[in-house]
Image (cartoon, rainbow, N blue to C red):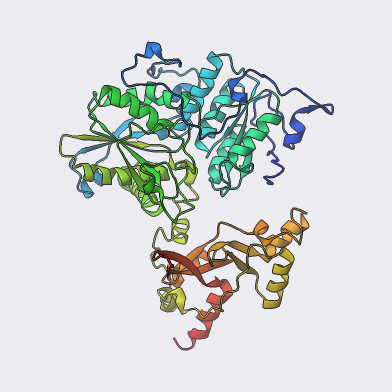
Amino acid sequence: MSVKTATVCPVTATSPPHVKAMNGVKDVNRVNGEVKDNGVKDSPFREWRRPDLPSKCTYQPGTPLEKSPHIHIKQQPKPKIMPNILYNIGNSPLVRLNRIPQQEGLECEVLVKCEFFNAGGSVKDRIGLRMIEDAEARGDIKPGDVLIEPTSGNTGIGIALASAVKGYRCIIVMPEKMSMEKVDVLRALGAEIVRTPTSASFDSPESHIGVAKRLMEEIPNSHILDQYRNASNPIAHFDCTAEEILDGCDGKIDLLVASAGTGGTIAGLSRKIKMKCPSCKIVGVDPCGSILAVPDSMNKSDVTFYEVEGIGYDFIPTVLTRDLIDKWYKSVDRESFLMSRRMIREEGLLCGGSSGSALYCAIQAAKDAGLKKGQRMVVILPDSIRNYMSKFLSDDWMSQRDFLELEQQLEPSKEWWWQLNVSALKLLAPLTVMPSVSIQETLDLLNKESFDQVPVVDERGQILGMATVGNMMAQIVKNKVKRSDPVSKVMYKQFKQVHMDTSLGQLSRMLDTDHFVLIVHNQRQYGSDGKVENKQMIFGIATRIDLLNFITSHDTEQ
């Protein structure tokens, strides 16, 4: 789907009656060829502001709720018979972990708040419903209006779920990185989906935030509830999630750990829990590659992409107030996914990848804090495995990213090459192009050299992406690019790459689903200023034919 034209997917047959299919953004605000007025002018959700502006919240510890300018509610117990599914949002269970804490040598009690028991499967159901109901209470929106939300998926599912029940049309704008499971759930709920490049900076017109803003400006009676700035985001957790935890723990908590995405969860939790349990320490979890942690020095990293979804950002959302967060930990993909798989296998908790991030860092935090027997730690598990069935639950997906070593399951006749390193392959010296080289020049070069793909590198030799003959021709045929355009316009930014010590067995599994794999090695480079820089250099490109030729040429010898 083209991001530039922002074409919106047709609405599924499960849409509410008032939802009409749309062929493109430009068509939805026209009736009989006339451009209609863009709807309610005084709605605060039509006044777009940057999502990284400093918070203007005047909250101070000890401030009575009567002086709050916001709407506050109390979490009600679940009725025996629910009037609709929205009543199954909140009151998620607190569950004690047993095997993992024991294996990790923890003496303290470890409780997890299982937010995947909410109706839509994540902690974001709370804010999706709360933002809508607070806006309704103020008269800012009404059924039949259009709700647009830029999201990593879970907030979108929460808003789409509430929209389906309440009668709103829902458009969700989300990065391409997010799983197809999330997309399928959103479509089933009647939401319309727009995908945007994962690599786009948040303030780029092509980012999910930038595209949502443009849609709002073009579609009548549309609103962006804006989880990044909406006070109902942290207030939902201040009023309800925190109270549920305090009630379940009888007010005794020594350490609370939560990962941060928009930051609304940890902001709301930290304020209420510090208010009622001042001695409790609050720990935030932020993935490497994100910049939410404090101090800023923690965020310095060569990582620019991470696989865990729903946490971390390249800007500080307005709702993320960090003043009451005592300590931050940085998470990494491999340990996060392995911990999620452990929770599934050893504790029976069907949780998502960010839950693994939270628990992995929580274990480190408990050890660092020296928590003893009789003390208690609570960890927030944000979402369920449902959204990631094709990702970290898959052994192949994990092994392709070097997160998991596959067991040997080959016949003896084939075992001789399985454990050899990819460095054993006799690969040709790599051919690379600069991003400024034209598409036509790249095609001519690949034709001359008899290659199907070529890495795109910058002046320092750093890998920017991959350009393939198939993708370049497809883009040209569809008139999306010109032959004179730079090759950077058609390069893939997400591709498989492995180091030279990766086994040929792992490589063969990757080549089951990918046409090529980039082989890289690390190089330490000393600069004139005396600093050492770690660079990733290209060793070669491995294809199926390379592996096949290697095996067959050595079969006789073996």
Asked if one can make out residue 494 in the rendered structure from this viewpoint, the answer is yes
Tell me the residue at 54%/37% (across/down).
151
Q: Spot the residue most to the front.
A: 529
Q: Position of residue 31 (x, y in %)?
A: 80, 26
In this view, the residue in front, 365 or 178, is 365
Residue 1: percent from left, percent from top: 68, 46
Q: Quadrant of the C terminus?
A: bottom left
Q: Is residue 406 above or below residue 117?
A: below
* Left or right of 270, for residue 554: right
Residue 329 locus on image (x, y percent)? 33, 45
Residue 13 visible in the picture: no
User: Vertical placement of 556 versus 471: above or below?
Assistant: below
The quadrant holding residue 165 is top right
Q: Nearer the viewer, residue 274 or 121?
A: 274
Q: Tell which of 27 and 550 is nearer to you.
A: 27
The residue closer to the viewer here, 81 or 95, is: 95
Across the whole image, how many numbered discs are drawn on residues?
Answer: 0
Q: Which residue lies furthest to the left in this view?
A: 373
- Occupied quadrant, residue 222: top right
Q: Position of residue 318 (x, y in %)?
A: 48, 31
Residue farthest bottom in this picture: 557
Q: Residue at x 73, y 72 (%)?
A: 444
Q: Compared to 35, does 396 lie above or below?
A: below
